[in-house]
Amino acid sequence: MKRYIAPALVLAIAALPAFADQAADRKAITNMFAAYDKAVGKKDAASIRKMMAPNATVKGPDGKTYPLKDQLAGMEAQLKMAKSIKSTSRISNISFKGNNAIVTYTNNLRMVMANPQTKKDSTIVVASNNRSTLVRSKGGWLMQQMETLKADISVDGKKMNMPGAANTRSTTR
């Protein structure tokens, strides 16, 4: 029995750096999501772009994958139109596979903007469940693919469907 303890101890000690690396990676990813929320609140599209891998994609409500760069122009326009915006992300799980991390999280977004038709302020609220794949780069972690699994959207308290979404699936962050 005693001869099994030594090899097990050696394996446990050898695994410590991997656990330490994962702890550092978890902290870096958590900090990245906090920085994303802060950038959204500041309407800082340039900082948001820096968090994205050059070939990042968004999985659309139709199950198809689209280049993120096609979606960013719309996001930037919304940020410019917003009078105020607050994003709160809460990570529920991070798993690692090689140089990738799969992050599941919720995001609550609240945006006030002038309604283009009435010119009065409208409040848009999006509560979403999401999954993102991140890739490790020389500069840290970057978003590789974003998918919204479920989104509840309201405008001035009235529930809305995401355009083109089936069963509340959407392409929001």
Image (cartoon, rainbow, N blue to C red):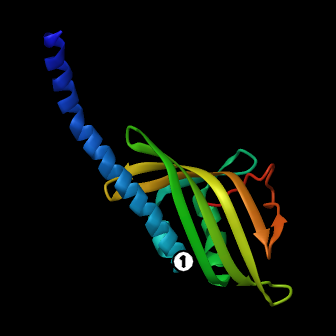
Q: Quadrant of residue 12?
A: top left
Residue 170 locus on image (x, y percent): 72, 55
Q: Identify which residue is drawn at 32% across, 59% down.
A: 139
Residue 73 locus on image (x, y percent): 63, 71
Q: Within 10 Å of the Cα at label 1, are there few (<14), some (14-19), or many (20+) other Cα atoms?
A: some
Q: The C terminus appears in which quarter of the rendering?
A: bottom right
Position above or below: 114 against 50: below
Q: Identify which residue is drawn at 37% across, 50% down.
A: 136
Q: The N terminus appears in which quarter of the rendering?
A: top left
Element under disc 1:
helix
Foreground pick, 139 / 67: 139
Residue 61 locus on image (x, y percent): 74, 50
- Residue with the mark numbered 1: 41
Q: Identify which residue is drawn at 59% across, 56% down.
A: 106
User: What amino acid is labelled 1 in the image?
Assistant: Gly
Q: Point out the residue furthest to the front here.
A: 1
Q: Is residue 48 left or right of residue 165?
A: left
Q: Is residue 76 left or right of residue 101?
A: right
Position above or below: 13 against 76: above
Q: Quadrant of residue 99?
A: top left
Position above or below: 15 against 126: above
Residue 96 locus on image (x, y percent): 41, 40
Q: Is residue 65 left or right of residue 42?
A: right
